[in-house]
Image: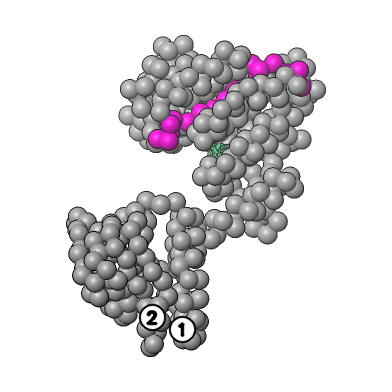
Amino acid sequence: MNSHRVELVAGEVLFRESDPPDAAYLVERGRLAITAGSDQRRIAEVGAGELLGEMAVIDRSPRTATATALEPCVLLAITPEQIAERLLNTDPVVRALLEGQLRRYRQTLAQSLGQGSQIPEGEGTEALLGIDKIRLEGELRDALREGQLEARFQPLLEIRPGRVAGYEALVRWRHPRRGWISPAEFIALAEETSLILPVGDYVLELALDALMHLDDARPDQAQFVAINVSARQLLEEGLLARMLERIQRRSLDPGRIKIELTESRALDPIRVAVMMQQARLAGMKVALDDFGTGYSNLQYMHLLPFDTLKVDQAFVRNMHESTRALRIVESIVGMAHALGADVVVEGVETAVQLEQLAAMGCRYAQGWWVGKPQKLSELRHTDRPP
Ligand code: C2E
Ligand code: CA
Ligand code: CA
């Protein structure tokens, strides 16, 4: 439905108290009085450029006031569908803020009109979800301050010599009441806000700690540590420079930090390509993570100068039952090698899977069969696969 114009003469009523909320209006010309209560007290006046009657549309409740033209008016009607569509595309937190404001406004209005607190019941679950997010966001801020974030390190096995080549740092949140929270839950939340930036800094520090620990434990082998860097972090100016500065401050070799990037709808591939190139120029290694899922786009593969391709764990799972799945993994391994990149297959949970990967010439494997994510202090530093 399209917006349409409404013209009123002076004294004409646009809507009355308790009318259904059929539209909201943008005032293009003229002024209107908003009155409410048994005595039709004037509670507001609106003019050109202002929005009118949108509240009842948002919470789908009858009009709580009457709008009357004070002079000839021209209005643009906005349908409830138009408003609903915009709200649906809004960040849930913003939506929750709006719904909260609206409830408070209605409460104040009802009180000022001496009706007690008659608050129309909206659809509360969305608002609650948003509030929950705001709460969690605050708690994540505290967590960063109080050091409740930890990293676990999952080994990456170089299959042929049977050697642990490096580790992936995976963040965990030890929440004071909820216990361990997985990154799947809070990384997405952190990505919606700038909180992902301090989280990323924190994980980098933990990864650098790990490199120093590994040097003490295995001075003969320069193992790497991989960190996950999300799309939102890439948008930050100077991210690489800051990372590099931290690495150099500890006199560590940037080549032992591997950045894992996932293709994302939030980023254009050129940006990912530039970031990969810059990271490599700075001496760091780059992996394309979760290959084959989500937004992996073959069209842009040739632009991305990754050192390593990480095949998502969804592929390995079907390998022993489906020859087609096996052939697909084989082909991805072949493609990566043809591009001069290494391949890591993720989610290896059985000895059979590891053998299959070895047979197809896949160089690296990661997964529970090789080793679960562990605390730094628990890393075994053995070369043997289990
Ligand atoms: P990811 O980068 O794909 O990490 C691999 C995930 O698979 C990890 O989940 C790991 O624990 C799990 N995994 C490893 N081996 C196996 C296996 O054999 N079987 C099964 N079923 N699962 C396995 P986790 O730790 O829950 O991390 C989830 C995601 O959160 C990660 O997926 C990554 O995208 C993100 N993440 C983790 N840490 C960070 C971080 O520091 N920063 C950012 N931006 N994202 C992070
Ligand atoms: Ca990863
Ligand atoms: Ca992955």
Which one is nearer the viewer's eye here, 264 or 72?
A: 72
As drawn, the label of residue 334 is none
Q: Which residues are magenta?
A: 250-267
Q: Is 294 drawn above or below residue 141 in the view shown? A: above
As drawn, the label of residue 113 is 1
Q: Quadrant of ligand 1?
A: top right
For residue 153, say whether it is visible: no
Pointers 2 and 1 in contact (C-beta within 8 Å)? yes
| CA separation in Å, label 2 and label 1 | 8 Å
> In the image as oriented, which residue stretches furthest toward the right?
216
As drawn, the label of residue 36 is 2
Look at label 1 and name its amino acid. Answer: Leu
SS for dot 1: loop
* Residue 96 located left or right of residue 170: left
Residue 200 location (% of width, % of height): 62, 35
Q: Quadrant of residue 73?
A: bottom left
Residue 189 location (% of width, % of height): 54, 47
Q: Quadrant of the C terminus?
A: top right
SS for dot 2: strand
Q: Is 261 drawn above or below residue 1 in the view shown? A: above
- Residue 372 colored in magenta in the image: no
Residue 61 location (% of width, % of height): 35, 74
Q: Is 29 drawn above or below residue 274 in the view shown? A: below
